[in-house]
Structures are given as C-alpha cells and as structure tokens.
Image (cartoon, coloured by chain):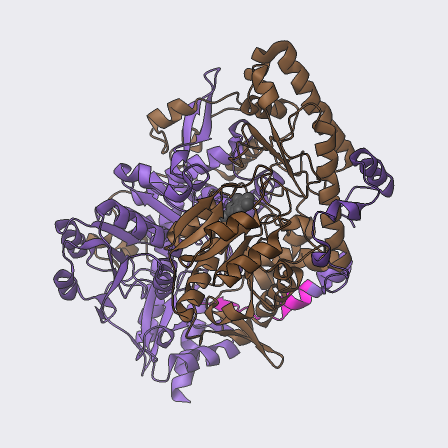
Amino acid sequence: MSDFKVVYEKSRPGRTGFSLPVTKIGDSAVDNLIPEQFRRKEEPLLPEQSEPELVRHYIELSLRNHHIDRGFYPLGSCTMKYNPKVNDAAAGLPGFANLHPLTGSENCQGALELMYELADLLARITGFNRATVQPVAGAQCELMGLLLIRAAMKKRGNVRKKILIPDSAHGTNPASVILSGYQVAQFKSTENSMISADHIREVMDEDTAGIMITNPNTLGLFESEIEEIAKIVHDAGGLLYMDGANLNALLGQARPADMGFDIVHYNLHKTMSTPHGGGGPGAGALGITDELIPFLPTPVVEKRGDEYYLDYDRPDSIGRMHSFYGNFGIMVRAYTYIRHLGAVGLKRVSENAVLNANYLKERLKGTYELPNDRICQHEFVLSGNLQKKKGARTSDIAKRLLDYGIHAPTIYFPLIIPEAIMIEPTETESKDMLDYFVDTMLKIDEEISSDAEMVKGAPYTTPVRRLDEVKATKTLDVNYQD
Amino acid sequence: MPYIPNSEEDQKKMLDSVGVSSISDLFKIIPENLRLKELLDVPPALSEPELMRHLEEMAAKNRLSKISFTGGGIYNHYVPPVISSIVMRPEFATAYTPYQAEVAQGTLQVIYEFQTHICRLTGMDVANASMYDGATSMTEAAILASGYTKRNKIVISDTVNPHYREVMRSTISGLDLEIIILPSKNGQTDFNELEKMIDDSCACLILGQPNYFGYLEDLERGEKAIHDAGGLFITVADPISLGILKTPAEYNADIFVGEGQGLGLSQNFGGPLLGLFACKKKFIRKIPGRLAARTTDVDGKPGFVLTLQTREQHIRRDKATSNICTNEALCATAATIFMSMMGRQGIPRIARLSTERAHYLADKINDIKGYSVWNNSPFFKEFVVETPVPANEVIQGAAEVGVAAGIDLGRYYPGYENRLLIAVTEVNTFTDCDKFVAFLSAQKTR
Ligand SMILES: Cc1ncc(COP(=O)(O)O)c(C=O)c1O
C-alpha cells in the first residue's frame, strides 16, 4: 500500500511500537520527584505506531530515493563514489560504536590510535607533516582553516582584513570567510576559468590575509600557475588555503603542500568514500604547515611512547570547534578505506576518476557546449546554452535524466558558466554506465530538438513529478498540523 | 582494486577516444615538478580479511564499561535495532542532499517528519533539518540573535555545557561578539547577578534546562530579564527530558537548541552527533540550515521540497544565514524513526524511567557515609555527588570493577575536583545502581 501520508496521518491512539520496562513506583510517583512547575502540561503529541507499520512506512519512503547503490549519481563537486560496505562494518564494531567520548584515555587507546593514524595518513597524502580530523564537514574545515590563518596573522602582528576568493568558488567559501570575521574580496577568473598569477599580483595587498583556492577548480581544471600564485601571496605576507573538495583528482599524483598551500581541507565523505547520508554526516580534515601547528583546535591527539592521549595544554590553540573530537564514526570509515586501498590503490582512484571524466567530456562535447575544451581532471562543466536556444534549459535536462534512472549532475554551479552542467563520474563507474549516460544525454538533446515541451514537462516516471516550489515558499508548510 | 570497474581494455578504448596514449598524459596539465614521481608514503593495501582483523584489533583496545553512568551531553539511551536496520539502508545512507526533489522524496519526507517531531517535542513553530551538533546549534542561535537584535553581547550561564561554551567561543572568535559568562552558585545560575548583568545591549541569554549539572533552573526569571531588555531567550535542552519537562515554548523561548544523540544514535566516541535547532515562526527567514516543506506536484500529488533556499550559502554566498552545507541528515533520519517509534507514550516513558532510576541512585548514594548529593535542587537524569576523595580517584577505582562512574567536574570547574557528575538512563538497571553503590560503600570503609 503505497501512499503519500506522513507518519502522523497513520497514527492511531493507544498504539505502541516500543518495548520498555514500566516504572517501579508508578508514573505519577515518578512525576512527583520533579516539582510541577518544571513539568510539561501535555504530553508531546508524537505519532503512535506499531513496529511493523513503522518499518513499512520508512521502507516505502526509502524506495523513493535515488542513491549510489542503485544508479549513476554524477553530481559534480560531490564525488558520489561507491561507499564500500566494509567501511560500515568497521564503524559498527561495538568497540568503536559504543564508546563514550569522556572515557579515560586508558580506555580508548584504539580510538585515539585510529584518529592519530588517520591524521597522519591524510597528512602524507597532501604532503604536510600534520593534520587534524576534528572538522565535521567541508564548510567547518573552511571556518577552522580561516581561524588558523587569523591566529597566525595575529601572531605575526597584523590580522589583516580580507580573503581573496575567485568567482568560481563554492558558496561555503564566502560564507565561511564572513563567519571568520574577514571580508570577502572576490576576483574574476580568466576567460579560461582559471586564476591568473598576474591578476593575483594586482589584487594581493597588505590588507589581504590570504586566498582560498579550489584545486582542481570547480570546473575540474588544474590551476597550473599555482606555484607562482603561492609565491606572490607568500611574498606579500598572506597564506594559501586549498579547498580540497576535489582531492579525488590528485590522490597519488600531486600534493598541495608541494604547490605552496599552507592549509588543505579534505572532505572525507567525498574523497574517502564515506556515505553522504542524504545530506550528511560527513567529516573533514585539515592538513597544515608547521607554522600553524600551535594553533590547532583542541584537543590534539598526541603520542608519547606507545601511548596516545588528548592534549588540551595548547595555549595558542584556536580552541575546540566540536562538542567532542569530530565525526569519529566517519573517521573509522575513511581510515578503513585508505588502508584498504594503500598507496597503489589511491593512485588508481585518481587515474580512473580522471580518465572517466575525460571520456565523458570527449563524447559529450560535440552535442553540448564545452566552454573549456581541454584535458580536465575529475570533473568537467558543460553549458546547456545550445539546448536553451532549442527551448529547454539545463534544469529541464536535469529533470529528464531522472526519467532514465540517472541522478542529475550539479547544475547552475559554478556561477561563471551559464546554464552550467557539472559532471563528476568518479572512478567507481564502469565504461558501460558511462556509455549509457552519454547515450541518454544525446537522446535528451534529440528529444529537445523534436519536442522541447515534452522535456520541459519531465520527469514522468519518478514517485512524484515536478514540485511546486513557489507554493512551498508561500504556504511554508514545514511542520505538520493535524 | 575491488572498487574500480575499468578493465585494461576499457581504459585503452577510453584513452583512444580522448586521444591520448596513456593515463599519465591526462595529468600533464600539472606542472612537471609538482607531479609525484613515487608512490605516496602510505602503507600497502590490506585485503578485506586482513583489514577487518586490523580494525577489530584496534576496536578491542577500547575498553567499554558494562555499566556506565557517564553522560555530560552523550547518553547511553537504548537504541532499538529497528533504527539501524532502516538507517543503514543504502537508499538513505548513500544518497546526498535532496537537490533533485523528485528522486529524493524519501529523504525529504523524513526531514519534514523530523521537523514536525522536534516542533511537537519542544512546542516551537519551526525546526531545521539539523546542524553539526548541539554546540554548533547553540552558536548559530547566538549569531542569529545578534543579527536580529543588532546587538553584540551574548550572555550565557556557566551552568551551560562547558564544551558548548568552548565551541561557541572558538567559532565566533573572529566576529565582533562579546560573550558574557554568568556565574553560578550551588550548581544553579545566580539569578540576582543575571538580573544585574542583563541590559539593552544584550542580544540573547542562553540557559540550559536541565543545566550541565542535571539541575532544573528558574528559567522564568531569565526569560523575564532578557525579554524586558529586548533580547532573545535561547534554551538548551536534552530532548529526552522533554518527555516530561516543561517545553522551551512554555518558557517562551525564542530559540531552542540541543543535542539529539539520545534520540537513537550510538555514542560513537562523540560523533557524528545531531544538532537540534527550533524557533518561533518569526525567525523562519533567518534560520540556519535546510528546511523541507510540503507542497504538491504538477498532478496535485503531495510531495516535499527544500524551501527558503535563498537563506543558504549556495545561493546567498557571503550573505547566507550560515556556512553549513553538509549537515547530519542520516542522524536526523535515525532520530525521526526513533521518535516515530517511541512516540507519544515512549518518549515520556524513557524520561520517567531515567528520572526514577537517577533518583533511586541519588538517594542510595546520599545514604553512604562521606558521599552526598550536592544540593537539594530538583534534577532530571543527571546529578552531582560530592565525593570524599577526588572524583577522579572514584572514577579510576570504579573502572576496575567495570563501572564508568561519571565525569570529574574538576576538569571544567576549578575547585570542583571532589564533585562527580552522574547520568542515569533507562538502560541502567536498579541492579547496576546497587552495584555502583556497593562499590562506593566499600571504598569508604577501606
Ligand atoms: C568545492 C566545494 N567546497 C566546499 C564544499 C563544502 O563541503 P561540505 O558540504 O562538506 O560542508 C563543497 C561541497 O559541498 C564543495 O563542493
């Protein structure tokens, strides 16, 4: 019985789905342990459901999701690669899953070792001596990294005022800059969607604390002038932050530390194959230069002899940024992945991710406009301009793809490409799947030529069809009312 | 390589269509001197059986206590197996942010139900789809309050979770905000001081209910003081406590924040967690994080979308209400199923069982010579015991008999070295409590 009711509409008074003991002294006696002025007047009007009904409800909902285990998910910038099951098995080991964070360090040596070793592996991958695994997402990495820059600048004597960001940057970059107390100094990419060293020379000044660069950038292009850019920024007393959302392209190929970056962030939920969870949880990490080590967030996992411990005694630290130590459950998965792949495996990842992307790019570029016709790294950005002239926009192409069982690429980002279609296949897709995607994209182009209106009405085969977002904004039904 | 489908032959065909002769040609765009000539300095691959053995050995180095009274924001509440059996389904676990609503109705409806559950538990009008953790939610609430009131003083009691206060201090350290810490007396916010310190330069007041020590505070006095001064009232609460305790809405809070770990998540060494955030309707356009809304499709069928996205970083960039993008959606999914399952009767049951057992243990400990419950304030599931020896020694000793005794308050409050914070949940049996009591009694006579 497939329906579109929310759980409240299926609730019946008196049903229970839980199995818990009853109170010994009776509920009203328990209530009297707490003075009435502190007690709620009515019980919370949550649903009343039995276990089997509840399971069916959520299984039915789950079936309405597209997900990586079912089909292709070329969502650019998000690295939707296969999430190995062994990672989940490792994270579910009771010794990890049931550990309280405030247990004494003698009781959590395994967990501390894992965090220490993961940070070390991550640092090696990007060429730094040190990394922290405390951040829980890319955006938190950014804020933490910017606060490290702030702390370092303060130590040097002048916090400075602004951070340079290219117009191709992800939205979290400027949002994080504001939260860190800096101003955003946005600059234009070149016609080739790159950063030019000459331009940085012009805009870099004594008020600029640093620059945030995504490399490969959000168009999937390697910033080839990066060393010169680093020199210019460093000579003017600034620091370089690398948004490493795209590290999948670099694994075993090149290291951000060698390029001159002072900080690199990792999205473990992208590069290191941890599940995206319908929006999270993810986990992040920061690799940093030695200059920044004193400012690392507390606590820092350290090793003395064979013993691991949490170091809180760090007077220059920017302080804690998570309730405990970060998303440990995700760290276990990332660690498992890196140990499973080893040095050779990591290199195969970048090789095949980049090969897959270039293959798709070559096969699609005759039909869709390719603003930057060059070798790309792990992803590339097409424009839906030609299709728009024929009557259907990028958003329509995205919706039509859903009818063919493919998740849409990232669309309308980066902002510098009109009608952007950002495609990241990842290394875990087969040539057969890539060919199916190409065939589908070509077919959609033909459909637009012959019947643009049909494409504009897509999708047709999904659990629901195009949804009324304007109505959603108007009625703002965000909280079910009986 | 188990996760890479390309065969050599596939690779060759693909290279041909790209028009290059080898994979390394694809990396020539990277300047020669930057290209790694050697493999990464990372250990060689482990096969899956070796890998699992290695991880099992690592996990085995962690010593779990059979009986635990450690809380402080992470609680050992019962997690029914139903939760993981649904949450670990790839349909939920391997999807991402619902950017294409038509193929993400599962995730979107779950978020909508989550928002509704949180609203009903707290009495608030609007809840978001989750934040990183309770500490981040609290920080985001303070930032919202400052933006809304155009004031820069954040007033917070020192009885609010010290970790949350640390996270807030670090997170906003670059902003022009001032944090004012209210002192406490006997585990309670000093409301006389509070009334003196709050004025019309204060953006908000943040109080916990129960507070970090487990005690219940006279929130009405705080509410009146901050609202009279024109600031916002923010309360931090344990969602399980709301099974029986007065809701943030009943206290006339503007924003509720809290940690949702107790709603069906394992302890996981402190993460991932689940930041809860709910507020009055008038702040809906200022709320950080994602929001799901119910609407209809072109055929009139009900369905769900993300709404008011113009608040978010991917559209508003430097003017966004928050920088958060990836959130804790799967944890919210677990909490949604947990709340649907426990429901109207179950959440109050968990709250009552925890209350009953906590009070049982407190009374028993109070009877042990040398030990006493710190003060007579009403409490929920957590309380403080004054110990005859440093609390840390009690913790060490209890660990030997398989009991995690709680948290040494001296860690956070200088001078509180002889105070032990004890948390009790429905998972702790009366026998567990008796065992702990027996240990403490024996300690004293030794
Ligand atoms: C380029 C880029 N930077 C930053 C982020 C932010 O990462 P997160 O969503 O983990 O906060 C993302 C992804 O969302 C991204 O694609």
Where residue A196 appears, x then y in whole percent? 57, 47
| In this rendering, position of residue A360 left or right of residue B16 | left
Residue in the image at 73% along x and 24% along y: A439
Where residue B252 appears, x then y in whole percent? 21, 46
Judged from this view, the residue extending furthest toward the bottom is B446
Judged from this view, the residue extending furthest toward the top is A450
In the depicted view, which residue is nearer to us: B28 or B61?
B28
Against A111, residue A17 (above or below) is above
- Chain coloured brown in this rendering: A
Residue A447 visible within the image? yes
Residue B69 visible within the image? no
Quarter of the image for the C terminus of chain A: give it: top left
Where residue B377 appears, x then y in whole percent? 23, 66
Q: Number of numbered discs present?
A: 0
| In this rendering, position of residue A323 left or right of residue B377 | right
Where residue A251 appears, x then y in whole percent? 69, 54
Against A98, residue B106 (above or below) is above
In the depicted view, which residue is nearer to us: A4 or A243?
A243
| In this rendering, position of residue A114 left or right of residue B422 | right
- Chain coloured purple in this rendering: B
In the depicted view, which residue is nearer to us: A192 or B122?
A192
Quarter of the image for the N terminus of chain A: give it: top right
Q: Quadrant of residue B197?
A: bottom left
In the depicted view, which residue is nearer to us: A474 or B73?
A474
- Stretch of the chain drawn in magenta: B55-68
Residue in the image at 54% along x and 29% along y: A418
In reply to whether residue B59 is colored magenta, the answer given is yes
Residue in the image at 78% along x and 42% along y: B5
In reply to whether residue B316 is colored magenta, the answer given is no
